[in-house]
Amino acid sequence: MSYCKQEGKDRIIFVTKEDHEAPSNAELIADDPNDPYEDPGLILPSGEINWNCPCLGGMASGPCGEQFKSAFSCFHYSTEEVKGSDCVDRFRGMQECMQRYPELYPQEDDNENVPPQGGDEGGAAKATPSTDDSNPSPTSGPGSASFSEDAPPADRTVSS
């Protein structure tokens, strides 16, 4: 036999094996699309894009927000066989805008040329490009990354 017990704000329900064997008669309440506490996600129930969704990471605002919205909307509503293939010019415009603001929109490949940072607890030493090509290392020699004076200090460190 099942019973309930109230502990503060919590209600504890104890059930028996027999209770679990019987089909549930619980009625599910439909989601209220106007519930202010319900997080609707990227696509609203109406099918429109939720520009306030945290999943967009703020891309819909900022200096390139309009270009992002244009490109993303085009992709979302695209009916082409290759979805979004009709949106290339809009994405190109968004990319050009983002390249004008590298401090806000860093390129993914910006970190590819930086040596990995080690977990050395003794601290990290500043990297100095070597002029000795007889013993090439990841931080020296032909084809290696040069360090910009404008780069943040964290980008110019390597483990010692």
Image: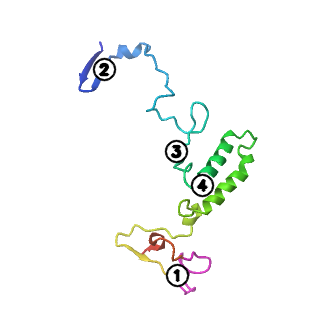
Q: Is residue 107 above or below residue 134?
A: above
Kindly report the distance in space between the C-alpha atoms of the residues bearing marks 2 and 3: 36 Å
Give the number of the mark in front: 3 or 4.
4
**Sequence order check, earlier mark of 3 and 4:** 3
**Sequence order check, earlier mark of 2 and 4:** 2
Q: Is residue 125 above or below residue 118?
A: below
For mark 3, give the secondary structure.
helix
Give how far across and how far down residue 39 sits, in percent: 48, 35
The residue tagged 3 is 55
Residue at position x 66%, y 47% in the image: 70
Give how far across and how far down residue 86 sits, in percent: 75, 46
Q: In front: 128, or 64?
A: 64
Q: Which amino acid does label 2 sit on?
A: Ile
Q: Is residue 43 left or right of residue 128?
A: right
Q: Magenta span has 133? A: yes
Q: What residue type is labelled 3?
A: Cys
Which residues are the magenta region?
129-146
Residue 123 placement: quadrant: bottom left
